[in-house]
Image: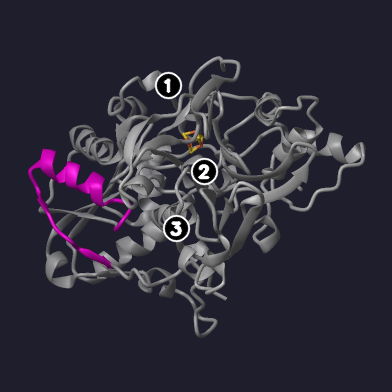
């Protein structure tokens, strides 16, 4: 079997979440929002909505359109408030049990939750709870917060949520739905993005602002790290969890994960991604004829590189957008097929040209090596690989598909050894200072996957499948 996950040489997005309160078509808006956030997770999708009395839920495995193609799905999601979730399984295995939102009944009543991120002390909390008799439905870390809420001595649901969140370490953005409230929260380090928007006096929250654009909502602001926002019939009110020692926004959201048309952490992704390419051109110029991108991940940085280097930007690789994440090869001989099914070089653009090939990052290097070979086969005279982020030396424990050190080519090889492996004429990465120069307030960003400086303690033996 040939799985597209194996050929996609990128870290994967974590999850996308959205919530809305006070709109009679709440679930429809969340459905559209999830469509816009599809890039953040393709393994499952779900929406929970409330009419003020009960909470209805529909979720399933697959893309948003597939999960909600069931004609019975949307009609049952009635009410004025809803939350939604697109999942990529950073923790827990992929099955319907781990799809979100998760809905439970506790002493505070019915509550639904959708989570983006990874709770790094989840194993310890879970073990303690299991030892004292708790039974878990899922193998996902997101369920832990519901148990903490259910066990809280606080009787008010917002206080119980705050009480639960104080016990968590790691990366999280949550949206909670009760019959009369939407509650959104961002962890005190601020690893993952979560923004507040408004449409016709109705508040909405979402991982990225592309979810606002699709329903015509206006961006108001980013939730602050550690902020809890409660939206109900009384309006909106905000409180804060205890401050973290520092802020740690994920720089990789700007490099790759977020959509270029989104605004996250208060900054435009497109602008920062172009600036990464511009800076790369200053740090690592190449004597070449054209600049091409590995689509779609390298497109925006390649535009920036071309602009500063005054080289022509060309479309030298065509991406097949209809290839899903679960491509199955028709036969066992999958050599060279996996990348070809997704990308095809344009020979007229490449023949006899000295090419700068821009991508956002290299994880294992397997895909880039095949791309370089394909370009060479189509007549490219020289291939200069330029990467708009520094070498990835360390795994991420904050909501990104975990790679072990051994899966990261930059952890195993020098840059010259990687160049040889890729069979490129030259290879250069952006420097860490260069990367940080593209964002405002660079000290607010996490760079652990590049420099190993993890903002929180990471438990020994931490693993995606530890449950
Ligand atoms: Fe983002 Fe890297 Fe930090 Fe993970 S380790 S949160 S991918 S910057």
Q: Nearer the viewer, residue 270 or 237?
A: 237
Q: Select label 1 or label 2 by which is in front.
A: 1
From the image, tell me which residue sits under label 1.
Answer: 444
Q: Position of residue 199 (x, y in %)?
A: 35, 42
Q: Select label 2 or label 3 by which is in front.
A: 3
Q: Secondary structure at mark 2?
A: helix
Using the image, determine if residue 320 lies above or below residue 255: below
> Is 59 on the left or on the right of 437, as rendered?
right
Number of dots carrying numbers: 3
> Is 186 on the left or on the right of 265, as rendered?
right
Using the image, determine if residue 120 lies above or below residue 100: above
Identify the residue shown where x is 37% and y is 55%: 422
Q: Select label 1 or label 3 by which is in front.
A: 3
Task: Tell me the magenta residue range.
Answer: 295-318
Mark found first going from the N terminus, 1 or 2: 2
Using the image, determine if residue 444 lies above or below residue 362: above
Q: Residues within 10 Å of mark 2 (few under 14, many from 20)?
A: some
Query: What's the distance in space between the residues labelled 2 and 3, CA to CA?
Result: 47 Å
**What's the mark number on residue 28?**
3
Q: Are marks 1 and 3 in contact (CB under 8 Å)?
A: no
Answer yes or no: is residue 466 visible. no
Which corner quadrant holds the N terminus? bottom right
Q: Secondary structure at mark 3?
A: helix
> Is 314 one of the magenta-colored residues?
yes
From the image, tell me which residue sits under label 2.
Answer: 412
Q: Position of residue 405 (x, y in %)?
A: 58, 42
Identify the residue shown where x is 60% and y is 61%: 59
């Amino acid at each position: 079997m040939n799985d597209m996950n194996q050929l996609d040489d990128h870290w994967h997005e974590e999850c996308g979440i959205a919530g809305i309160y006070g709109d009679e078509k709440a679930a429809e808006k969340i459905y559209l929002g999830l469509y816009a956030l599809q890039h953040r997770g393709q393994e499952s999708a779900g929406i929970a909505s409330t009419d003020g009395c009960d909470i209805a839920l529909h979720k399933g495995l697959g893309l948003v359109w597939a999960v909600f193609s069931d004609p019975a799905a949307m009609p049952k999601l009635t009410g004025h408030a809803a939350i939604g979730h697109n999942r990529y399984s950073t923790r827990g295995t992929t099955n319907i049990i781990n799809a979100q939102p998760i809905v439970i009944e506790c002493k505070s009543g019915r509550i639904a939750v959708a989570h983006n991120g990874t709770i790094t002390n989840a194993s310890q909390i879970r073990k303690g709870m299991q030892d004292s008799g708790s039974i878990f439905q899922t193998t996902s870390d997101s369920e832990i917060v519901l148990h903490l809420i259910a066990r809280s001595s606080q009787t008010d649901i917002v206080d119980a949520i705050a009480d639960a969140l104080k016990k968590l370490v790691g990366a999280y953005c949550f949206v909670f739905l009760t019959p009369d409230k939407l509650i959104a929260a961002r962890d005190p380090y601020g690893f993952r993005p979560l923004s507040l928007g408004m449409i016709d006096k109705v508040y909405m929250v979402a991982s990225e602002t592309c979810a606002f654009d699709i329903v015509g909502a206006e961006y108001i602001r980013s939730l602050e790290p550690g902020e809890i926002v409660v939206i109900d019939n009384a309006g909106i009110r905000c409180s804060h969890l205890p401050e973290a020692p520092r802020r740690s926004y994920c720089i990789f959201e700007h490099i790759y994960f977020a959509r270029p048309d989104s605004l996250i952490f208060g900054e435009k992704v497109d602008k920062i991604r172009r600036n990464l390419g511009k800076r790369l051109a200053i740090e690592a110029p190449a004597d070449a004829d054209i600049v091409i991108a590995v689509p779609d991940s390298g497109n925006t940085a390649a535009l920036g590189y071309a602009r500063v280097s005054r080289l022509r930007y060309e479309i030298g690789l065509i991406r097949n957008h209809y290839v899903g994440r679960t491509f199955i090869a028709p036969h066992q001989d999958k050599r060279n097929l996996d990348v070809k099914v997704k990308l095809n070089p344009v020979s007229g653009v490449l023949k006899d040209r000295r090419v700068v090939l821009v991508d956002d990052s290299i994880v294992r290097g397997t895909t880039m090596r095949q791309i370089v070979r394909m370009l060479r086969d189509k007549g490219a005279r020289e291939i200069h690989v330029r990467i708009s982020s520094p070498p990835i030396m360390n795994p991420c424990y904050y909501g990104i598909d975990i790679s072990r050190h051994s899966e990261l080519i930059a952890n195993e090889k020098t840059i010259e050894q990687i160049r040889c492996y890729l069979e490129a004429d030259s290879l250069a990465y952006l420097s860490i200072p260069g990367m940080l120069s593209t964002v405002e307030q660079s000290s607010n960003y996490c760079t652990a996957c590049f420099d190993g400086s993890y903002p929180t303690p990471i438990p020994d033996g931490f693993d995606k499948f530890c449950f």
